[in-house]
């Protein structure tokens, strides 16, 4: 049985919404965009949501809207997609890379020195794998040092922490709609969420070339808007997000029941993960992967190389031992909602061959 790591889904409902938007709305700035933003804000529980062209754009524009510039330093964990750190450098600020805890791979605020905390101007905690990070520890330092929090919720649509959706916990939340995410816009896309009107307006302006009014531009900006057709598809996906996240949690419980030992990363004790990735941690990681590959079962490693060891970050000379160890032991199993129970049992059988 061939089991891919990821399966892309294009439903009749998505197709219908796309065609309807293309036939009836402006390709850019159509009413699907504002409707998607309203619905997303309501879902996350923030006053505003402003759509953009990707998760990377969401992060970068959020930092700009908060006034982060070449005199700023911004903290982010090293166990993430490169965009979590690149957005800092794209606005000419200096990244402060933090280590992670070995339990769930989330940011470990104890690894940030008090000197770094005192000189930081913002923090980008990442809800990695769809699991909320230890947000209380982030908030404590951010409040003590009085700097804003930009949540990287690019993998965590619908996850909650102490009952609140991630993306509503900090000053700005950033989401990605890349096709592999828990919800997509059938292409690249992103969203920012905030309760702060001034920040929302700045993000709106920066995504649209720094526009103030039709003919007046009062800041630098990009063309980083979300296209109408993508917003129309996003609205359909948002409607089905909770049911898909429920299926992901079901999938995890089937894995847990059938794997020979408990090697799935735990979810935050104060939170509810949406299991964007189902990650196992095991010393025999490479053998498990080989067994799966030999049997046509897809798997992946997030992340094989922590950000601080990537060629463009080596110049900073960071040594972050937990993430270096973690990256050698973790791997992701298929987690998409279309995965059948039968397929999960086959995957478990092969993993068990190595770990039991
Ligand atoms: C944690 C994290 N941050 C940022 C991004 C960037 O999102 P995008 O690919 O939409 O630019 C991603 C997406 O891959 C991500 O997983």
Image (spheres, rainbow, N blue to C red):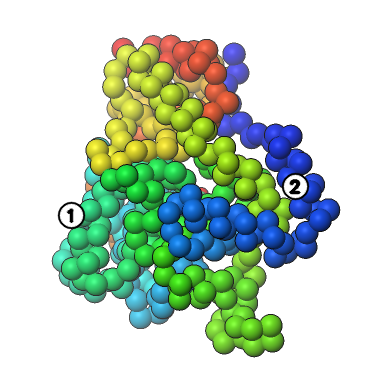
Query: What x and y, as percent, mark residue 152?
Result: 41, 55
Do callouts 2 and 1 mark residues in contact (Cβ within 8 Å)? no
Disc 2 is placed on an element classified as: helix
User: In the displayed image of the protein, which residue is found farthest to the right?
Assistant: 23
Q: Kindly state the secondary structure of the residue where label 1 is placed.
A: helix
Residue 242 shown left or right of residue 166 in the figure:
right
| Percent position of residue 241, x then y | 53, 39
From the top left corner, tell me how far across and down residue 166 is, in percent.
Answer: 38, 50
Specify whether residue 265 is in view: yes
Residue closest to the eye, 92 or 34? 34
Gap in Å between the C-alphas at discs 2 and 1?
A: 47 Å
Query: In x, y percent, where is residue 329?
Result: 33, 33
- Report crowding for label 1: few under 14, some 14 to 19, many 20 or more residues within 10 A (C-alpha): few
Give residue 86's quadrant in the image.
Answer: bottom left
Which numbered circle lies on residue 18?
2
Which residue bears the numbered disc 1?
110
The residue that appears at 41% across and 74% down in the rendered structure is 66
Q: Name the foreground residue: 337 vs 87.
A: 337
Query: In the image, which disc is placed on residue 228?
Result: none
Query: Who's the residue at 32% across and 68% down the image?
Result: 148
Q: Who's the residue at 55% across and 23% down the image?
A: 339
Residue at position x 37%, y 14% from top? 258
Mark positioned earlier in the residue sequence (2 or 1): 2
Foreground pick, 76 / 232: 232
């Amino acid at each position: 049985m061939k089991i891919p790591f990821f399966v892309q889904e294009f439903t009749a409902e998505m197709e219908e919404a796309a065609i309807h938007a293309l036939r009836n709305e402006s390709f850019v700035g159509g009413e699907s965009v504002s409707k998607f933003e309203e619905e997303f804000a309501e879902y996350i529980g923030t006053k505003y949501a402003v759509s953009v062209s990707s998760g990377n754009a969401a992060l970068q524009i959020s930092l700009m809207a908060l006034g982060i510039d070449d005199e700023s330093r911004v903290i982010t964990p090293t166990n993430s997609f490169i965009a979590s750190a690149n957005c800092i450098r794209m606005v000419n600020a200096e990244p402060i890379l933090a280590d992670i805890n070995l339990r769930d791979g989330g940011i470990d605020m104890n690894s940030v020195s008090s000197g770094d905390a005192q000189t930081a101007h913002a923090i980008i905690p990442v809800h990695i794998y769809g699991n909320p990070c230890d947000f209380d520890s982030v908030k404590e330092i951010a409040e003590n040092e009085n700097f804003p929090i930009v949540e990287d919720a690019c993998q965590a649509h619908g996850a909650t922490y102490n009952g609140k959706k991630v993306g509503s916990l900090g000053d700005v939340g950033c989401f990605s709609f890349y096709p592999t995410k828990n919800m997509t816009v059938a292409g690249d896309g992103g969203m920012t969420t905030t309760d702060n009107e001034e920040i929302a307006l700045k993000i709106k302006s920066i995504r649209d070339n720094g526009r103030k009014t039709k003919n007046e531009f009062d800041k630098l900006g990009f063309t980083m808007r979300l296209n109408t057709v993508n917003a129309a598809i996003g609205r359909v996906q948002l409607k089905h997000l909770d049911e898909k996240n429920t299926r992901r949690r079901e999938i995890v419980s089937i894995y847990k029941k059938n794997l020979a030992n408990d090697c799935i990363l735990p979810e935050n004790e104060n939170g509810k993960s949406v299991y964007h990735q189902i990650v196992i941690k095991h010393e025999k990681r490479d053998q498990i992967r080989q067994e799966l590959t030999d049997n046509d079962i897809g798997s992946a490693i997030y992340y094989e190389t922590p950000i601080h060891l990537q060629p463009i970050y080596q110049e900073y000379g960071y040594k972050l031992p937990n993430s270096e160890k973690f990256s050698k032991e973790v791997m992701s199993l298929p987690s998409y909602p279309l995965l059948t129970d039968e397929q999960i049992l086959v995957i478990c059988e092969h993993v068990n061959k190595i770990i039991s």
